[in-house]
Image (cartoon, rainbow, N blue to C red):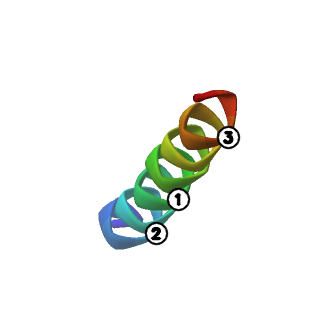
Amino acid sequence: MTLDLYKEDYIELIIFIWYMSCLRW
């Protein structure tokens, strides 16, 4: 299963979105 890999990618995506949101503010 690649659930772990998917989870890591998902976390990175969330961090990226959160980071961009912080820059907007």
Q: Residue at x 46, y 69 (%)?
A: 5
Pick the front one: 24 or 13: 24
Amino acid carrying label 3: it is Leu
Relative to 13, residue 24 above or below: above
User: Callout 2: helix, strand or loop?
Assistant: helix
As helix, strand or loop, the secondary structure at mark 3 comes to helix
Name the N-terminal-most of marks 3 and 1.
1
**Which quadrant holds the C terminus?**
top right
Nearest the camera: 1 or 13?
13
Residue 8 x, y percent position in the rendering: 43, 67
Q: Position of residue 10 (x, y in %)?
A: 44, 50
Distance from disc 1 to disc 2, alpha carbons, whole Å, reads 6 Å
Residue drawn 49% across the image and 55% down it: 15
Horizontal arrangement in the rendering, residue 15 relative to residue 16 (left or right) = left
Task: Return the residue at label 1.
Answer: 9
- Mark 2 vs mark 3: give the one in front: 3
Q: Which residue is mark 3?
A: 23
- Callout count: 3
How far apart are the two marked residues, 3 and 1, measured between alpha carbons? Answer: 21 Å
Image marks 1 and 2: residues in contact by CB distance under 8 Å? yes
Is the N terminus in the top left, top right, bottom left or bottom right quadrant?
bottom left
For marks 1 and 2, give the one nearer the viewer.
Answer: 1
Q: Nearer the viewer, mark 3 or mark 1?
A: 3
**Residue 6 appears in which quarter of the rendering?**
bottom left
Q: Which residue is mark 2?
A: 5
Please provide percent x and percent y for residue 3. Answer: 32, 61
- The residue type indicated by label 2 comes to Leu
In the image: residue 5, left or right of residue 21? left
